[in-house]
Image (cartoon, grey):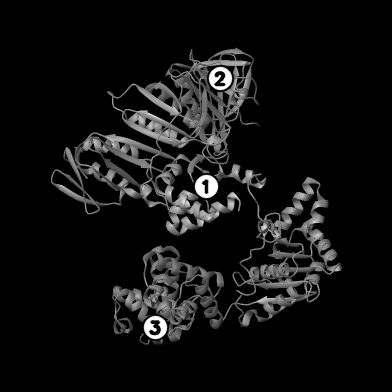
Amino acid sequence: MKLSCTKDNLALVLSLVGGIAGKNINLPILGNVLIKADTQTVEIVATNLELAMVAYLRAKVDEPGQFTVPARTLADFVNFLSGEKVDLELVNNELVVTCDRATTKIKGSPADDFPVVPQSKDGHGFTVSAEDFKNGLAQVTPALARNDIRPELSGVFFSFNPEGFKGLVMASTDSYRLAEKKIKLTQGEESFSAIVPGRTAQEIHHLLSAASSEAEKNVRILINENQLVIHYDGAQLVSRLVDGKYPDYTQIIPKDFKTTAGMSLAQLTKEIKAASLFSTTGVNAVVFKFAGESVALASSSTQTGEYSSQISADIVGEENNINLNHRYLLDGLNGIRGERVYMKMINADSPCVLAPEKDESYLYIVMPIRQ
Amino acid sequence: MNNLEIWQAVLAELELMVSKANFNTWFKNTGITTLQEGQVVVCVPSTFSQAWIEKKYHHHIIKSLERVTEKPIKKLEYKIDSIKNIAEACAAPAPNTEIPPETVTKPATTPTSGGFTLNPKYSFDNFVVGRGTELAFAAAQAVSNRPGEAYNPLFIYGGVGLGKTHLLQAIGNEIIKKNPHYQIVYVSAEKFTNDYISSMKGGEAKNFQDHYRTADALLIDDIQFIAGKDGTQESFFHTFNELHQANKQVILTSDRPPKAIPALEDRLKSRFEWGMIVDVAAPDFETRVAILGKKTIEKNFPLEEKLIKLIALSIQSNIRELEGALNKIIAYHDLKHLEPNEESIKTLLTGLSVGSMRHAVAPRQVIDAVCEFYNVNFDEITSKNREKRLSNPRQIVMFMLREELKTSFPTIGDELGGRDHTTAMHAYEKIKREVENDIKLKQEIDLIKQKLYINNV
């Protein structure tokens, strides 16, 4: 195997796949990336047996072949190179990297032991705008459950063309808060739903964020009962799906509200951050009182002290109050774009909804902390 | 043969072919979904394992399947499915699979009680009897020969890792072997407590009673844990009485004798002492050698007598530790493809705890070990020179002589070139203080200790 490419291309591709390669006690080769040079193209592959990323490296191939080297070592090393052009050559089970005047030999293992990336066969195909998809994922992933107690909650629920909506609905919840984002599909009419592992959702986001400005505008999705394949800008991501049935979360979304308050997003975020300094660690409670023309925030902790402040707001409906976890609130507010945000609620024991102005596509729900 | 057994046979062949890591990664949670007229569907947990097995092992699987079923395999397909679904399908035997009579016999595992099983690995045959365990072993055998008659209850106590559980389970296994119809209940005291609690909660006291009071032999491990739990104690008291009345065998183990269990009701204490109390003591050197010899044969890893003695000398307190050390040695040499020798074993043992290796060391050896570590010589350290380079190691010697050998202060002074006993006292106090705050110093001293004890084996 012998090939040459630019340092920037190589570094970019390695950063795409590098996050997936990792330690595995049973199969140490999973810490490696596979460099697969065909006569025309070069593929860089990493997998953790749950998901795999195949990225195409633009390179000139002098001699086809394949080899695997530790992902971290190669990526860290490439970042230190100062030259423009990098030559990679396989000599006696070592990858010789030449750049400028530096020559390095990296030890690796033969490609035969590297897992095969399952080839996508049939499934439902959809296309979606890369920008929408990226932003949508960023909005729903914070609400993912961080543990595996209920595996289905550790993934993002993807529902293509569900009843009553044409497009892709993504939802995630850890049972304390819930985020839902609806985006348009540019292609694809079939209905299908599946749970995509949280890790995969993050890697997709990573892949879409790393793309340059002249990259493709659309992402192609191929999905069936067992796996999800994402094609974007020459890269391919294959992932297993989470087994299980996603809870019917739509029934907990409140429909009618007793109190609705509209206020400045920036101001609310700032006040919540200030209040968070004085809330009891672990409980993270901030008390909201909706009355008259303002929302009053208060928090107190036996260790740090007390905080109270007010934000002017347009309040429609009854006076009301509720205790909410500031961390969950900030995660939700982070996903909201625009000037104003609406907090909608029924009473102190029912979920509170955060919604942007004039935008029905994003919804964030926080369960209250009961006194 | 049913699908499950066929697949097990195939796996057994594959296991020999591939490395253990590969086997565990790729063949975990696989199984046969259907097998009909030469067409096989194998279920795999994910697309990744499907792709890999298809690429690497397809032909091997077909060949093994043909060998096992003695029929040609025309088609082998893979399907992604959860192994659980198959297990359920197998539980209800499929109509088209013949079940030969021998597969319908008694299951391989001995009767269970709520998930707690006697491990068939524990038997009297593989129990190595030493001086400390002779009595316990004899009593255990007597009980298993005549359950309920010989000694009832039998109470076995002793420290951790000395073989209490082994004996207890061996009795259970032996009773089952002799009387297959016997209902044996083997639980830990903790499980007994939990069962009692959940029976109270769920209002199923009847089930609890049925389960425990109808047993032909009740084996409870680590009974000391019911101490302080009054409700459980009372329930155990009644269970015990009922079983004892009916001449059913009760066997208990604990980490201390009944008298020494705090917060245990007197009526229970006296009942525990009713039958026979035996202790299992730490194995002596010869027993340890015998145990290691047996283990090396079991694990098919022949070791020279000399090396076995080396290990037996280094690890003194407990059999579990002994086995752990042996496992480590086996793993190390297997992985590196090395022949075990004295050097490599000593290095490995250095990594294990040295807490157990307190044996006679002469003051001179301590001095030498410290000298070697700090690269000074004996004459220098015993000289009057008070350079920092020498004074610090000298103080460490004094500290170690006091701490490890319990040498008197005047003797310490004499050993180090006729110094005053107050010098030794000062050095001891000083290093003792520093060790508490200075991790590096502590590590140094630990290293010296390890060297000291290992080299003197």
Q: Which residue is mark 2?
A: A295
Asked if residue A157 is positioned above or below residue B69 in the image, the reply reads above
Helix, strand or loop at label 1? It is loop
Mark 2 surroundings: few (<14), some (14-19) or many (≥20) residues within 10 A: many
Helix, strand or loop at label 3? It is helix
Q: Furthest residue to the left?
A: A101
Mark 3 surroundings: few (<14), some (14-19) or many (≥20) residues within 10 A: some
The picture places residue A130, in percent across and down from the top left corner, at 37, 23
Mark 1 surroundings: few (<14), some (14-19) or many (≥20) residues within 10 A: many
Choose between A45 and A370: the one closer to the eye.
A45
Q: Earlier in the sequence, mark 1 or mark 3?
A: 1
Q: Amino acid at mark 3?
A: Gln
Choose between B237 and B365: the one closer to the eye.
B237
Does residue B77 show up? yes
Q: Residue at x 44, y 52 (%)?
A: B60
Choose between B387 and A141: the one closer to the eye.
A141
Whole-angstrom CA distance, mark 3 to mark 2, is: 78 Å
Front disc: 2 or 1: 1
Q: Which residue is mark 1?
A: B30
Quadrant of the drawing holding the C terminus of chain A: top right
